[in-house]
Image (cartoon, rainbow, N blue to C red):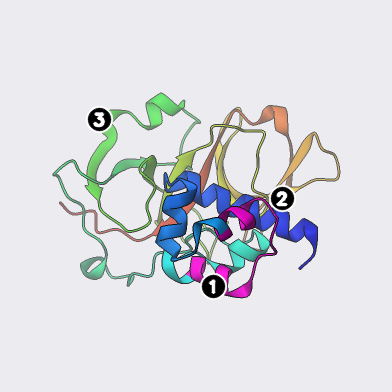
């Protein structure tokens, strides 16, 4: 593994630690790795071994494709049947991840506060590996099919540093008049980004980074039983 790829994987591991709210010692314990070796891995004093990377994939349920190459989603698509009877059901107990009765891609691009207004909450779900600051919203359209189908729900997380983009990941991007759910890809011009669909019938969009008002990182794709 070359040094550049090693560095990129280390950054993704640190991202996982931040998302899971774990310090280095806690992360090592979760993986069953010696704490001194963990420090060496994270500081690039020891090359990342296949065994160590497999521990992350198996113990944390992380996508190996994402861990190695930055593609796919960190935790992938939630493997639940499509039928509503077998999908995770909403709870009205107020515990877990909030689910909003809003379509993140429909209508005009309202602000974050309007989108995540408390009156839009229809329930909560408890799912493994879900970051505590995620919110669940609905997606319409087929531009991201078959990765995200019309009517699927996505768990999104607010991006605290818009300047740090995980290239190849799926984001909810807010422009002047509308929101889009797209892959973010590098552009040859550092002031631009490429918004890419999964569906080949949709063309790429070149957008100025300054025209993006807000980004939400898509962390999970799932089906929900929306009946309380």
By secondary structure, the bulk of the magenta-drawn segment is best described as helix
Query: Which sits earlier in the primary sequence, circle 2 or circle 3?
Result: 3
> Is 206 drawn above or below residue 12 in the view shown?
above
Classify residue 52 by image quadrant: bottom right
Residues under labels 2 and 3: Cα distance?
35 Å
Q: Where is mark 3, residue-wise?
A: 119
The verdict on residue 45 being magenta is yes
Q: Mark 2 points at which residue?
A: 185
Distance from the alpha carbon under mark 3 to that under mark 1: 42 Å
Above or below: residue 152 compared with residue 137: below
Give yes or no for contact between labels 1 and 2 (Cβ–Cβ under 8 Å): no
Q: In this view, does 155 lie to the left or right of 6?
A: left
Residue in view at x 52 percent, y 44 percent: 217
Q: Earlier in the sequence, mark 1 or mark 2?
A: 1
Residue at 44% x, 28% y is 112
In this picture, is 108 found above or below 137? above
Q: Give the range drawn in magenta.
A: 37-57
Magenta-drawn stretch contains 17: no
For the residue pair 199 and 38, the one nearer the viewer reads as 38
2 or 3: mark nearer the eye:
2
The numbered mark, 3 or 1, whose residue comes first in the sequence reads 1
Q: Which of marks 1 and 2 is in front?
A: 1
Tag 1: Cα neighbours inside 10 Å, few (<14), some, or many (≥20)? some
Q: Distance between the residues labelled 1 and 2?
A: 27 Å
Residue 54, numbered circle: 1
Please state if 49 lies on the left or on the right of 190 as rendered.
Answer: left
Q: Mark 3 or mark 1, which is nearer to you?
A: 1
Q: What element carries label 3?
A: helix
Residue 154, position in %: x, y? Answer: 42, 52
């Amino acid at each position: 593994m070359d040094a550049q790829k090693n560095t990129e994987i280390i950054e993704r591991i640190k991202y996982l630690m931040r998302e899971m709210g774990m310090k280095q010692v806690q992360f090592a314990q979760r993986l069953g790795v010696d704490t001194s070796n963990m420090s060496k891995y994270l500081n690039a004093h020891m090359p990342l071994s296949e065994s160590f990377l497999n521990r992350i994939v198996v113990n944390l349920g992380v996508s190996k494709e994402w861990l190695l190459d930055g593609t796919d989603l960190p935790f992938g698509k939630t493997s639940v049947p499509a039928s509503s009877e077998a999908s995770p059901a909403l709870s009205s107990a107020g515990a877990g991840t909030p689910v909003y009765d809003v379509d993140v891609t429909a209508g005009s691009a309202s602000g974050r506060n309007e989108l995540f207004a408390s009156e839009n909450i229809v329930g909560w779900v408890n799912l493994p590996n879900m970051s505590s600051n995620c919110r669940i919203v609905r997606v319409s359209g087929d531009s991201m099919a078959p990765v995200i189908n019309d009517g699927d729900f996505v768990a999104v997380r607010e991006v605290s540093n818009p300047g740090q983009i995980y290239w190849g990941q799926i984001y909810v991007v807010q422009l002047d008049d509308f929101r889009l759910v797209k892959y973010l890809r590098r552009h040859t011009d550092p002031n631009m980004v490429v918004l890419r669909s999964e569906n080949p019938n949709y063309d790429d969009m070149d957008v100025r980074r300054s025209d993006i008002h807000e980004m939400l990182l898509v962390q999970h794709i799932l089906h929900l039983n929306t009946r309380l």
